[in-house]
Amino acid sequence: MNTEQARFNMIEQQIRPWDVLDQDVLNLLSIIKRESFVPMAYRNMAFADFEIPLPADQRMLPPRVEARMLQELAVKKHETVLEIGAGSGYMAALLAHRGRHVLSIDIKPELVALARENLTANGVTNAEVVEGDGARGWADGAPFDVICVSGGLPVLPQELLAQLKIGGRLGVFVGVLPVQKAQIITRVGEAEYRVEDVFETYVEPLINAVQPSHFKF
C-alpha cells in the first residue's frame, strides 16, 4: 500500500467533502500518522471510512467523524482538554497537538495501556491517559476549556456541562437510534449554554452512559 497516497485520498475524498475545510486540521492529519494508532491487524485499513476494531470490543471512529469534531471544537494552544474515551489514543494526539494539555479517560484498562503506548511511541508528551469511568465527566481537573466525548450519550449528563469553563466547548454525540446528533455546546454564562447541531451520525454509547427515563408524567 502507498501510505501517503492513501492518506491523501482519505483527506481529499472522505474528510474534505464532510465540510472539514480548516487547513490547520487538514495539515494535522498528515502530521499525526493515523496508521501508527491502528492495531497491527488492521493497519492496511487505517484510512478506510469505517470504524476500526480495538481491544475490549471497542472501535475507532471513522476518520471523517474525528476530523469534523476536531475542527468544530477549535482547540487553542492555551486550552486544557478532557477527552472521554481514549480508544487508541489517536484523538488525544490530535487534540494535544492543538491544545496545551489533554486528559483522556477510559474505563477499559486494555485501552488505557494501548493509548499510553501509542502516545509515547508518537512523541506526544502533553497528553495523559487515566483509567476511570467518565460517563458523567471527570471532576478532577475541572473546569476544562474543551471536553470531547468520543462515545455516544443517549442523554447528556448535567455534570458534563458543569465541568466546562465559561467560553468552553463540549463536543458530544447525543441521542439514540435512529437519529443521533453531533453537537457543540458552548458555555456562554454561569447557567447559559449555546447548542449547535453540526451533523448526524451514530456512535456506540459510552459504557455506563446515562439512559433516558422511561417514566411518563
Image: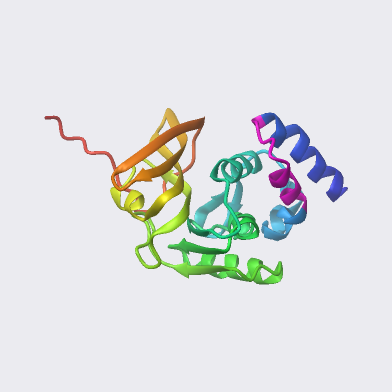
Does the image show residue 155?
A: no
- Residue 189 as seen in the image, left or right of residue 116: left
Does the image show residue 33?
A: yes
Residue at (46% x, 31% y) in the render: 197
Residue 27 % position (x, y) = 76, 47
Choose top left, top right, bottom left or bottom right for residue 12: top right
- Residue 215 as seen in the image, left or right of residue 77: left
Residue at (66% x, 72% y) in the render: 120
Residue 199 % position (x, y) = 52, 30
Q: Image height check: is 125 above or below 185? A: below
Look at the image and say whether residue 110 sits in the magenta stretch. Answer: no
Q: Image height check: is 72 above or below 159? A: above
Choose top left, top right, bottom left or bottom right for residue 43: bottom right
Taken as a whole, is the magenta stretch helix, strand or loop? helix
Q: Residue furthest left?
A: 217
The one nearer the camera, 34 or 160, is 160
The one nearer the camera, 1 or 198, is 198
Residue 89 % position (x, y) = 60, 60
* Range covered by the magenta-colored residues: 18-30
Q: Image height check: is 191 above or below 100? A: above
